[in-house]
Amino acid sequence: YKYHFYFGIANHSAVKANGYYIFAFTREEKIVTTDGEYEVFVERYVATDNPNTPKGSILRVGISAKTDETDGEGNPVYKEIALSGAFTKSGSLYMIERTYEQVDKLDDEGNPVLDDEGNPVKVNGKVLTSAYYKIDLESAESLGEQEGLPTYTAVTVTKLDATVYNSADGKSFVEIYSDKTALAVVINGTFYFVDETSYEESTKTYTFTLAGGKVYTAVIDDDDVATFAEAE
C-alpha cells in the first residue's frame, strides 16, 4: 500500500494568520482480479478535516488490463485503460471507457480554432463506442474497536459493452446494454442516472425513468440516430 498526505493553507481572518489543514490522508490500493485479467486502483480517504467527506470515500480510481508482456520477474504487465468517468450505484463502482469522434473546435463565430502551427484543434464530438466496467470490491473484516480503514481483499470486474445512440446534434446520447437497459443517459449535456428502462420494439422506443422521477423517451431511427424527449 501507499499512503498520501495532502494539505492546504487557509487564512484565518480573525487572527490574521495562515494555518494548515488536512485536505486528505489517503491510502492507495491495487487489487488484481482472481483471473488476473484486471488490476484495479483505488485511493480512499483515511482521514480528512472536511466533515462532509466520510472515511473510506473514494478520491481516485483506475483500472488496467493485462497485456501479453511480463516484467523482469515474469509478472504480467498491466496497461491502464483511459477512463471517461466513474460513479457508484447500488453498491457497485462503475468505470466508463469511451471513444469519441474527433471534430474541429470552433470559435464563437463558427470558425475552426487553429494551434500554433496552423492546424485545426480537435475536440471530442459524438461518442462512438462505450464500455462500462462494473467493479465489486470486498473489504477485510471489521477492525473492531480500532479506527482504521479495512483494506480490500478481493475485486470482481464485469465488462459491460454497450451500443451507443447519439442525437443528431450530438448533445444527447444513451448507452444500451445487451439486455436493453441503461445505467445512465446524457440529455443536452447533462448526465442522469436511470432507475428503470423499458423498450418497445415495434416503435424502437426506449423509455427511461430517471433517478429524480422524470421520464424521457428515445426513439431510434433507421440510421441509429436517437430523438430524445421528455414524456408528458
Image (cartoon, grey):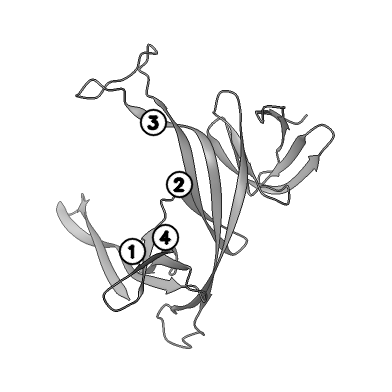
Where is residue 54 shown, x and y percent of the image? 45, 66
Q: Amino acid at mark 1?
A: Asp
The answer to which quarter of the image holds residue 158 is bottom right
Which residue type does callout 4 highlight? Answer: Val
User: How far across and how far down the image is residue 87, in percent?
Assistant: 52, 54
Task: Say which residue label 2 marks.
Answer: 84
Whether residue 63 sits left or right of residue 232 in the image: it is left
Q: Which residue is mark 4?
A: 61
According to the picture, the residue beneath numbered tag 1 turns out to be 49
Q: Which image quadrant: the C terminus?
A: top right
Between disc 1 and disc 3, the foreground one is 3
Contact, mark 1 vs mark 3 (Cβ under 8 Å): no
Q: Alpha-carbon neighbours of circle 2 within 10 Å: few (<14), some, or many (≥20)?
A: few
Instruction: Check contact, mark 4 vs mark 3: CB within 8 A.
Output: no
> Spatial distance from mark 4 to mark 2, Cα to Cα?
12 Å
Q: Which mark is residue 15?
A: none
Between marks 4 and 1, how big is the CA–CA gap? 21 Å
Tell me which residue sits at (53%, 33%) in the image: 189
Circle number at residue 123: 3
Q: Please indicate whether residue 198 sits to the left or right of residue 173 in the image.
A: right
Give the percent coordinates (x, y) of residue 149. Answer: 42, 77
**Residue plotted at (61% across, 28% down):** 167
Name which quarter of the figure residue 9 lies in. bottom left
Counting residues from the start of the chain, the first of labels 2 and 3 encountered is 2
